Structure formats: structure tokens, C-alpha cells
Amino acid sequence: AAGVIQSPRHLIKEKRETATLKCYPIPRHDTVYWYQQGPGQDPQFLISFYEKMQSDKGSIPDRFSAQQFSDYHSELNMSSLELGDSALYFCASSSFTDTQYFGPGTRLTVL
Amino acid sequence: AQSVTQPDIHITVSEGASLELRCNYSYGATPYLFWYVQSPGQGLQLLLKYFSGDTLVQGIKGFEAEFKRSQSSFNLRKPSVHWSDAAEYFCAVGGGSQGNLIFGKGTKLSVKP
């Protein structure tokens, strides 16, 4: 069965640079969630989209923005990167009222 | 406030022994509950979920969990642990129509031969 695809899998950036993470949901899933997992931490919800509209917002810094496109893929844009942004970033997709399925994650390292 | 507590940070069991990982939740409404497993550096794999109905739910890899409303608990169990079960286990609440997931801090499982 098709799974959630995230790209890139690994990303290394310098401080103050920008990064774009991409997420391709499972076919026919209309909802996308972004989570951030710091080293040794539990995943923290950042933001979600349903039918291309933002549906909920968590602890997402103002330096980050995201959107969901007409083909339902989503991109998380991160600017002015800080050392503390180094983390695993997960995307999950679901049909609106169903279970969230997670992608493999993007490991972002900020140097 | 909604929250999930996993009291055990790290558990070590012998291969073949039984396992129980504890999870307690605080949620205003009837919760949707989940257990996910994460191997080092990997994504989160769904083990099982509870939305409603039978309070004992079966999942993949021989895992099961029981929802106990009176105790606000959703403990994960396996009768016989295999070395490949070594991983980190996260309990979560929310999801579905309840929106984003709230995770516990996780329990790291080690399996000794």
C-alpha cells in the first residue's frame, strides 16, 4: 500500500538559511499534519491542513510557514534557521475523520 | 488540558517475557487513543487504535491494548516479546475528527536475550 512520502530525507543547513520540506500524502487523503520531534523528545504538533485550508495550528514558530497545494501535497517552509530547529520533521496524512499515518520524516540539521 | 502520561521512560524485558507499557490520558471528551512504535531514526508506525466499541483492541505484531475509562488508561500489552520489538513506544490521544495528536513522552523498550 502507498505510504506518506517525505523529501528530502536528510537536510543540512547553516544558521539563518532557509529550508523547504515536502510531504506527499497517501492517495485520497485530504488532511496533512506536520510534527516536529527534537532529540529524545516526543513529536510536537506544528500545523495541519484540510482540503488545502489551514485547519489547526500548534507550536509553530512565526519563522515557519506551510501550505497545502491543489494536489494535496504540502510544503513546510522554514526561514532564518536556528540551531534549535535541528529535529526530525514528520508529516502525517489522513482522511479527515480517520487515523493519521506518518511518513519516514526529514532529519534537519542546522550547523 | 489534554495530556498523555507514560510513567515508564525505559523498560527492559527478557525475550519471551510478557510486556505491559502504561499510558494514562487526560481528555475532555471520549478520546481517540493510539499506540505508535518508532525505531531509532525512523518514522512512527501505527500499532493499534481505539475509537469506540470493544475496549480490548488488537493490533499488529501481536500487540493489544485495553481502554479503561474508569482509570483513564490505555495500556499496551504483548504476551511474548521478541528481540525485534526493541524500539520506542508512544501513546497518543486525539486524531480523527479530534484533530492533531498529543503524544506521551514515550517508553523505550530494550529486550535482553
Image (cartoon, coloured by chain):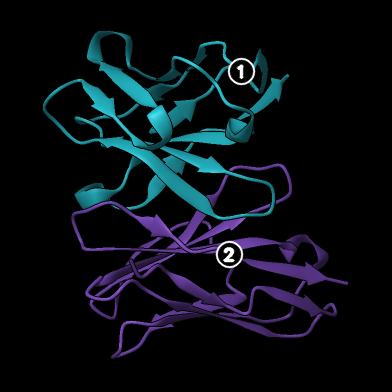
Q: Position of residue A83 (x, y in %)?
A: 82, 65
Figure quadrant of residue A3? bottom left
Query: Does the image show residue A104?
Result: yes
Compared to residue B68, the image places residue B61 above or below, namely: below
Q: Residues within 10 Å of mark 1 (few under 14, many from 20)?
A: some
Q: Residues within 10 Å of mark 2 (few under 14, many from 20)?
A: many
Asked if residue B13 lies left or right of residue B35, the reply is right
Q: Residue at x 52, y 78 (%)?
A: A65
Q: Which residue is mark 2?
A: A105
User: Which chain is rendered cyan in the image?
Assistant: B
Q: Quadrant of the N terminus of chain A?
A: bottom left
Figure quadrant of residue B10? top right
The image's mark for residue A5 is none
Q: Position of residue B70 (x, y in %)?
A: 25, 8
Q: Which residue is mark 1?
A: B8
What subunit carries mark 2? Answer: A
Q: Residue at x 29, y 37 (%)?
A: B49
Q: Amino acid at mark 2?
A: Gly
Query: Does the image show residue B92?
Result: no
Callout 2 secondary element: loop
Q: Residue at x 65, y 73 (%)?
A: A9
Task: Count up the numbered dots.
Answer: 2
Q: Position of residue B81 (x, y in %)?
A: 55, 21
Callout 1 secondary element: loop
Q: Amino acid at mark 1?
A: Asp
- Which color is chain A depicted in? purple
Tell me the CA gap for discs 1 and 2.
25 Å
Q: Tell me whether circle 1 and circle 2 mark residues in contact (CB < 8 Å).
A: no
